[in-house]
Image (tube, grey):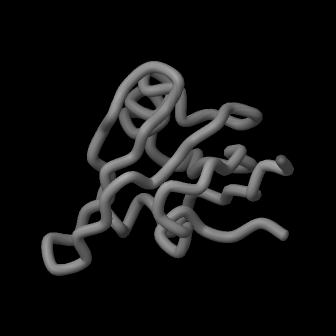
Amino acid sequence: DAISLDSATLDVTYTVERVPEADEQLIKFLSESLIIPEHPVKVVESAPYLGILMVSTEQDRISIGYSVAKDILVRQMSE
């Protein structure tokens, strides 16, 4: 089942199911970072007290705010 990225388990690889589409700049940022449907993503660090997650993609490691991460749906990849 799909979950939001902010509730993903650390160091587990997920496949992106859906990203928020309301903000053009956000879509551009996510696309450039390869946080797009059907691509793998992994939360490598979680800092709730700072309101950010460090996420690893095929291309890079980036910081994402919890407010954005809660709108990104992911599904755990099968082994």
Task: Say whether residue 52 is left or right of residue 25.
Answer: left
Task: Say whether residue 26 is left or right of residue 65.
Answer: right
- Residue farthest along the bottom direction in this orientation: 49
Nearest to the observer: residue 72 or residue 1: 1
Q: Residue at x 37, y 25 (%)?
A: 60
Task: Say whether residue 44 is left or right of residue 2.
Answer: left
x, y (%) of residue 22?
Answer: 53, 49
The quadrant in which the N terminus is found is: bottom right
- Residue farthest along the front direction in this orientation: 79
x, y (%) of residue 21?
Answer: 58, 45
x, y (%) of residue 36?
Answer: 62, 34
Nearest to the observer: residue 65 or residue 27: 65
Nearest to the observer: residue 72 or residue 26: 72
Task: In the rendered view, tell whether residue 46 sits above or below residue 60.
Answer: below
Q: Residue at x 38, y 30 (%)?
A: 29
Quadrant housing residue 2: bottom right
Task: In the rendered view, tell whether residue 56 sits above or below residue 66.
Answer: above
x, y (%) of residue 49?
Answer: 16, 80
Quadrant housing residue 25: top left
Task: In the rendered view, tell whether residue 37 sits above or below residue 75.
Answer: above
- Residue farthest along the left direction in this orientation: 50
Q: Residue at x 57, y 51 (%)?
A: 20
The number of discs equals 0
Nearest to the observer: residue 56 or residue 20: 56
